[in-house]
Image (cartoon, rainbow, N blue to C red):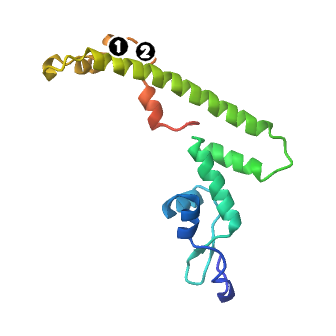
Amino acid sequence: MLETNAAIGIGIGIGELARRVGCKPETVRYYERVGLMSGAMRTEGGQRRYGEEAVRRLTFIRHARDFGFSVAAVRELLTMSDRPDMSCHEVDVIAKHHLEEVETRLQRLEALRDELRRMVGQCAGGKVESCRIIEVLSDHQLCNSEQAHGGAGDLRQGPYR
């Protein structure tokens, strides 16, 4: 949306918005592209201008993402937060589901940690040809825990895949 010359000085730019919330301008643009942030007002020169509502919304998004909520979950939470009179039951459902996923990942990461400790502990520090770590990584049968597999994969993938 283009604003008149009188509105050019109103609001803050994308850099200031990002600084206030602790992210990069590219992150703000990404959240606009995926629909979490509405498009900003623009000056006649095309510069984005944001108000305090954008600061609040971006703060919510960043905090939810810091908690590990996926973009899809944040979108749902934002939709619900825009309807303050509705029951928070659905918010609770999303948060409980996310908590279950976090607890599952923690269990898998603990098993992964234990398996890595065992591998490292069995390494004699000799040559690669007799390295226990290389042996275990090369042969799935040498692992003690099936649960450890995929633990690191959980770190690469976000919740609500």
Quadrant of the rendering where the C terminus is positioned? top right
Q: Which residue is drawn at 52% across and 38% down?
A: 158
Q: Would you say 141 lies left or right of 34 here?
A: left
Circle 2 packing at 10 Å, graded few (<14), some (14-19), many (20+), is few
Q: Nearer the viewer, residue 160 or 102?
A: 102
The answer to the question of whether label 2 and label 1 lie on touching residues, with beta carbons closer than 8 A, is: yes
Is 153 above or below relative to 14? above
Give the structural element (helix, strand or loop) at label 1: loop
Q: Which mark is residue 143?
A: 1
Residue 115 percent location from the top left of the image: 37, 18
Residue depicted at x 58% and y 66%? 17
Residue 141: horizontal and vertical position, in percent? 32, 11
In the picture, measured across the screen, residue 126 lies left or right of residue 9, that is left
Q: Is residue 149 above or below residue 22?
A: above
- Disc 1 marks a residue whose amino acid type is Cys
Q: Dividing the image into 4 quarters, which one contains the N terminus? A: bottom right
Residue bearing mark 2: 146
Nearer-the-camera pick, 73 or 61 = 61
- The circle drawn on residue 74 is none
Residue 13 in sight: yes
Helix, strand or loop status at disc 2: loop
Compared to 101, does 144 lie above or below? above
Say if 41 sits above or below 54 in the image: below
Which residue is at 48% across, 37% downward?
Answer: 157
Residue 71 visible to the viewer: no
Q: Quadrant location of residue 50?
A: bottom right
